[in-house]
Image (cartoon, grey):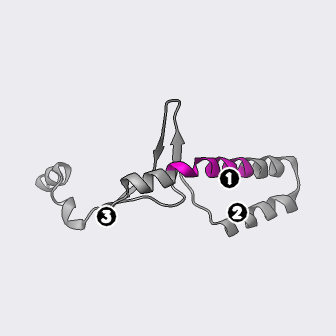
Amino acid sequence: MWLSFSESDIKLVKAALAKKGDKYSRVISDRIDEQIKRLKDLQPYCEAAMEHYQEESLEIDDDAVVSKGDDDGAYVMAWTWVRDSELKTTKRARRLATKK
């Protein structure tokens, strides 16, 4: 599952966790901090993906999900636009339409 939080959302969550003050809240807050550091460390992959692969039909967010592998590189989440008219041209759509 992928969730996207703004910086202000993260501050609200961390403030609520700090107010609660129990050990579980501290663990969650620490994990949030670890993820923020990880995202900052992986930011160069987003920038490289935008520079080399982004085009009219492929968009990459500034804060895209990055999955660093054991090899030399990482996967960067990208978005592609699909027109409604293209749905009618897929094999699956044609197959479903003929079953009606």
Q: Contact, CB < 8 Å: mark 1 with mark 2?
A: yes
Rendered location of residue 100, percent (x, y):
14, 56
Secondary structure, mark 2, is: helix
Say what amino acid the circle numbered 1 marks: Ile
Q: Nearer the viewer, residue 85 or 69?
A: 69
In whole angstroms, how far apart are the C-alphas of marks 1 and 2?
A: 10 Å
Residue labelled with disc 1: 36
Q: Which residues are magenta?
A: 32-45
Q: Is residue 56 above or below residue 36?
A: below
Report crowding for label 3: few under 14, some 14 to 19, many 20 or more residues within 10 A (C-alpha): few
Indicate which disc residue 46 carries. Answer: none
Q: Nearer the viewer, mark 1 or mark 2?
A: 1
The residue pinned by badge 2 equals 10
The residue singled out by tag 3 in the image is 56
**Magenta-colored stretch includes residue 16:** no
Give percent across and percent down for residue 50. 43, 56
Q: Is residue 64 visible?
A: yes
On the image, which quarter does residue 4 sit in? Answer: bottom right
Magenta span: chief secondary structure: helix
Q: Nearer the viewer, mark 2 or mark 3?
A: 3
